[in-house]
Image: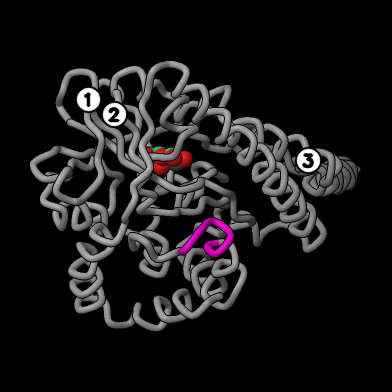
Amino acid sequence: MIKKFSATLLGSVTGCLLLAGTAVAEDWRAWNIHNEGHPNTAAMDRFSELVTEATGGEVNVQVFHGGVLGSQPDALEQVRLGAIEIGNFNLGPIGPIVKEANLVSLPFIFKSVPHMFRVLEGEAGDVIAKAMADADILPLAWVDAGARSFYSQKPINSPEDVEGLKIRVMNNDLYTSMISAMGGNPSPMAFAEVQQALKTGVVDGAENNFPSFKNVGHFEVTTHYSLSEHLIIPECICVNTSKFNALSEELQAAVRGAAEEAAVYQRELWAVQSEQARKDVEAAGITVNEIADKGPFQAAMVKVYDDYLGANPDMAALVKMAQETE
Ligand code: GTR
C-alpha cells in the first residue's frame, strides 16, 4: 500500500517536474559595452523587451550595460562558453577568433556603410555568419557602428601625421599592422582604459566613431578628430550557438525576429545620434577636419593587405566578394 502510494506520489511529482520543465523560462544575460546615451544601449533595452514579448516570457534577456560583465575579448569568451548568452559585439575583436570575420577589419575594404551592409547581406555575410556560428557566436542581426576615424592632439591629414604617434587600437593584429604601416606605434588596449590613457599621455591618440568618442568622454581629453574613416566595422547581436539551438523552432524565430527588429531600431537611432554626437563634440571644442585626399592612407594599406593575404591566402575569395559587391 505504502509502496503503491509512493509510486503514485513519485509519478505525480515527476509529472509536475516535467510540466514545470517545459514552462521554466530561459533567463539570459546580455553584455553591452556602452552606457546610457549610446544608441546601442537603447537598442539592447528594446531587444530585451521584444524578446520577452515575442516569446511570451519564455525567454528573457537581462542586459548589463557599461561593460560590467567584462572587457570585450573576455565577454566574447564568456559567450562562447555559454556563461553569458548574448552580446552586442563589434566584429573587430571577433577577427582573432573567427578568421572570416576579419574581412571587415581590413582598412578601406568598404566604400561606405551601405556598401558594408550590402556585403553582409550577400554571400560574404553568409560565410562570416556560418563561421561565427561554428565558433559559438551566432549573429542574430547586424548593427551599424559607422566609420572609425583618428583623434589626437593634432589634426591628421596624411599617414605621415601618424608617424611616431602611439595610437590605441582594439585587440586585433590587423589594427597593429595598420598603424605600423603608417609609421605609428600601435597600442592594443581595452576600451575601458582608453580615456585615462589619453588623459595621461600613455597614448597620443585613438580611433573610433562619433558616438563612442563622445559617450565615454574621449572628446574631453583630445582636441582634433580627423575624418580618415579607415575602418567601417559592423557589430552584431550575437548569441551562444548551443543555447540558441536548444530552443524550439518557434522560440528561435521569435528571438531572431526580436533581434532583427532591434537592429532596425538601432540603425535609425544610429543615423540620428551619430550626427548629434558630432555636433555635440564640436560644440564642446573639438575641431573636426575632413581629409581632402585619402589616397595616401589607402596606399599605405597595400602592405597590410599583401602581408595579410600572404599569410592567409584562404581569405582572398572573401576579399574579392567584398570588392566586387556594388
Ligand atoms: C566601439 C564599439 C565597441 C568597442 C569600442 C572599442 O565603437 O561599439 O564595441 O569595440 O568601439 O574601440 O573598443
- The part of the chain drawn in magenta is 111-116
Q: Quadrant of the N terminus?
A: top right
Q: Quadrant of the C terminus?
A: bottom right
Q: Nearer the viewer, mark 1 or mark 3?
A: 1
Tell me the CA gap for discs 1 and 2: 5 Å
- Vertical comparison of 56 with 248: above or below: above
Residue named by callout 1: 197
Residue named by callout 2: 194
Which quarter of the rendered image does ligand 1 occupy? Answer: top left
Tell me the CA gap for discs 1 and 3: 38 Å
Question: Is residue 114 one of those drawn in magenta?
Answer: yes
- Mark 2 or mark 3: name the one nearer the start of the chain: 3
Q: How many C-alpha atoms fall within 10 Å of the one at disc 3: few (<14), some, or many (≥20)? A: many
Is 106 displayed left or right of 90 in the figure? left
The residue furthest left is: 164
Nearer the observer, 156 or 148: 156
- Mark 1 or mark 3: name the one nearer the start of the chain: 3
Is 324 displayed left or right of 231 in the figure? right
Is 11 displayed left or right of 39 in the figure? right
Q: How many C-alpha atoms fall within 10 Å of the one at disc 2: few (<14), some, or many (≥20)? A: many
Q: Secondary structure at mark 3?
A: helix
